[in-house]
Each structure stands twice: as C-alpha cells, then as structure tokens.
Image: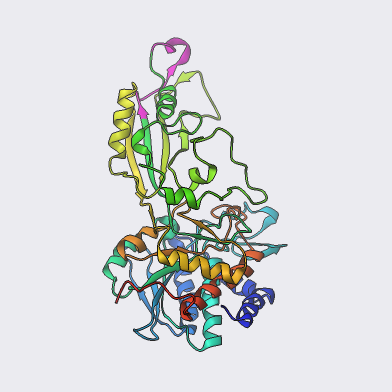
Amino acid sequence: MIPANLIEQAEEYVDSGAFFADLAAMVAYPTVSTKPESRVAVRAYLDEILTPALADLGCSVTEYPNPCADDGPFLVGTRVESPSLPTLLCYGHADVVDGHAGRWSGGRDPWTLTADGDRWFGRGSADNKGQHLINLAALRLLLAQQGSLGFNLIFLFETGEEIGSPGLAEFAATHREALRADVLIASDGPRLDAATPTLFLGSRGGVQILFDVDLRPGSYHSGNWGGVIRNPATTLAGAIASCVNGHGRIQVPALLPPELPDAVREALAGVTVANSPGDPPPDEGWGDTGLTAAERLYGWNTVEVLSLGSADIDNPVNAIPGRARAILQLRYVAGTDVSGVEKAITEHLAAHGYPMVDVSILGDFPASRTALDDPWVRWAKRSLEQAGGKPVAVLPNIGGSLPNFVFTNALGLPTLWLPHSYPGCLQHAPDEHMLAAIAREGVVLAATLFHALGNPTADHPLPARRQA
C-alpha cells in the first residue's frame, strides 16, 4: 500500500501551485512538429526541460537521431538500479499540434498557461506535456522518499507523435536492447470520462482513403446537360453510401472486424461513454445498433467521412462539376486485416455500379492492444483500486490512435496506458486544457503504480518477468 505521506506530497505538489508553474514552463515552448521553424523550440524543450528532469531522476540521458533524416530526434533517459530488478519503460512526446493562435476564447495565448477555475488552458497542457509531467513528478517524489525507485527506468521521448511518429518503429527495432523492459507504463489520450480513473491497453488503427470521381476537365451547364451527363458529386455520394450508409453502418464486410471477443464485451459491459459535462450525447440509431455505444467506440470498426467536396459550395453556379472527391477514414480494432482494403473497396464499388470511382490509400497506422487477461493488467488495476478506493475502468483500447504497436509488436511488451486527460479537453483544438482535479488525482495514481512496482509484497506480487 502506498504510504500516506507520499499521497500527501503528490497532492501538495499540485495544490501548492508547483505543478502549474512547471506545466507553464513546458507550455511556453511552441514545439509544433508540423512546422520546420519550430525545431529550435523542440531542441530547447529537450535540452532545457526534459534532459534536466531525467537527470534529476538519476538517469543517463542520450539523444538519438531519427532514422527518418528530416524528422526530430529521440531522447532516452536510463536509470539502472540492479539487473535483478524489473525494468519499466515510460513514454511521452514532446511535440504538439499547431497553436491556432487568435482562435482561443478570451484572447488566450496558446503558449501561456492560464487558469479559469478548474481548467488550465494551453497548447500541450493535455497532449502531452501535462501528462508526461505527471509521470516525471510521480517518479521524482517516489525517488525522494525512498532514495531509490525499486526498479530500473527507461524513459523514451519522441518529437513527432502528432505527425504519425515517423521513425519510431525503426528506432525501437534498432535499439531493442537499450529499450528492453518488462512493461510499458505511459500516459496519453483521454480517460473514459473526467471522473473515472482509466487504464487502456492499446489503440485503434486507421486507414485514410481517397475517393476521386474525375469525369471531365470542365463543368457543363446544368440546364443544357442535366440528365444527360453523369454528375460526379451525385456519383460520389452514392459510392460513399454504398460503403457506409446514412446511419453510419458499414456495408463492406471486408471493413469489419472478424468478431467482438467475449473478453472485450465483458470489459465494456459497464462502460458508459459521453459521461462528462458538455459531451455530445450518442445519437440514437447511429452505427451498429446491435452493439452498445462503448462496444462501437472501443471494440468495433467505423468508417467516417473526413472531408467531401465538389465545385465551390459557397459560390454555386448552374453547372455540373467535372470532379468530386472525398477522404474517408476506417478506424479499426486489433484483429482486423486491412492489407486488402483498397482492393476490397474497389471491387465493392464496381459491383454496385461505381467503377468510375478511383480508390487510393493515403496513409495508415496499425491497431494493437495488450490482452485483457494479461497478468500486468490485473496487477495494475488492483494496485490503483486499492489505493484510490474506487473502480478503475479498463478499456481494451482507446478509440483514437497512439504508437502502441511499437511497444507491443517491435518490443514485445505489455502496455498499460494511464491517461491524465478526458474526452472534453479539446486537444488539437483551440482552448485545449487540463483539469486541475485530474492533475491532482493523476500524480497520486502514477505514484501509486510506481510505488507498487518498486515495492511488491507477498499479497500483491509482480507478474512473472518475461525477459532476462
């Protein structure tokens, strides 16, 4: 059981304003990975924030170049206490999305952390600077109290998660020995809701798909040619509806997962989605109505239209356009075979009378998850519930994307994600924020898990080690 004074210190770190001050210093670095001019800020963030934080944990710190030459580096902090102890791998990302300056409410600056009640606004406050700050702080508090962690630590930071983690898989494969660990404990993404401590075990993958109906180089008068020549926008609408109908139900069998495993169904049986103030309610009749909202979000696949266009929608003219395009996305769970998606959609469209629709894959990222019955999952859930005194939601994966596959596939690790944000945090949008209450509870939860890792007991032992 975590000592009471460690809990008090974790809460005091937030209550005293020290956490806010540390997060404000982090947010001030505009580490936008989509902008080459932000590389100076990324470099400064690594050198001035993360390297000292890792050094304070007694880590040796090494920066590695990205195998993708034009992308940002990786930073690895390593603390070895004893080869006989388990090794923890932690992960975070230093980069953020564009700040959207000028679009924040109240004239807020995205690079200045500002408080409005329980909400702390600033780019990166939730994704991911506030989250890796919580874990760094919990490790620091544990080390200060015990004089040691009771385990070996590897902390990996990347600088390109917001652009798809270029080079991360290659880096992990090349440096398998340097990253060898027993378990990953990391923080990113949202909790189930603001009030519910959550563990998730992976992420859905995604495939981005272009539908292009390019019929002719120009437009033709709708009065003179309407009813005679094919309209690409009408064709595109029909093609999309043949793949995912107007109620969000997938019509192409190859885009569906093979099953909803019993273990996933059981884990999601008591889960309620959209349970925080301000969340949009799930729409009745949308998606596969044979599944619960939680099963649709965390255990199933979805096809979404991300953009759709033809001609100038704001300035229409009486003409049949020559071209229409849409970008769709398949969000899919582990177990779905996506290797033949392009071929399956093309054949489906041809069979339904739309051979003129060109289908191409623009990009993809893999789905992955740790098994719900993995011993590390049971260990973590029990650790958190014993200390917190309330139930912890365990999700097979989040609905969004993370580079979880790097850790499960390339490194062969069980992955435990302990998120310190919530679905309404507005990450990637103006007014991104962290909730003070989640930060306070998050430091306690992270300290609890790290303390349990370093202080196993006969009543609550660690899972058997998988690696020498």
Q: Residue furthest bottom?
A: 147
**Side (left or right) of 40 relative to 315:** left
Which segment did they paint magenta?
213-228
Q: Residue at x 44, y 12 (%)?
A: 226
Q: Residue at x 37, y 33 (%)?
A: 211
Residue sitting nearer the eye, 171 or 65: 171
Quadrant housing residue 218: top left
Q: Position of residue 467 (x, y in %)?
A: 31, 73
**Side (left or right) of 347 relative to 235:** left
**How are the residues colored?**
rainbow
Quadrant housing residue 86: bottom left
Residue sitting nearer the eye, 14 or 143: 143
Q: Position of residue 240 (x, y in %)?
A: 42, 29
Q: Is residue 376 above or below residue 263?
A: below
**Quarter of the image with the N terminus in it:** bottom right
Q: Is residue 305 above or below residue 411?
A: above
Q: Is residue 390 above or below residue 275?
A: below
Mark yes or no: residue 377 visible.
Answer: yes
Q: Position of residue 373 (x, y in %)?
A: 41, 59
Q: Residue furthest front?
A: 459
Residue sitting nearer the eye, 268 or 302: 268
Look at the image and say whether residue 404 sits in the magenta stretch.
Answer: no
Quadrant housing residue 442: bottom right
Mark yes or no: residue 356 visible.
Answer: no
Look at the image and say whether residue 214 sits in the magenta stretch.
Answer: yes
Residue sitting nearer the eye, 175 or 147: 147
**Quarter of the image with the C terminus in it:** bottom left
Q: Position of residue 88 (x, y in %)?
A: 41, 74
Numbered marks: total: 0
**Side (left or right) of 112 relative to 351:** right
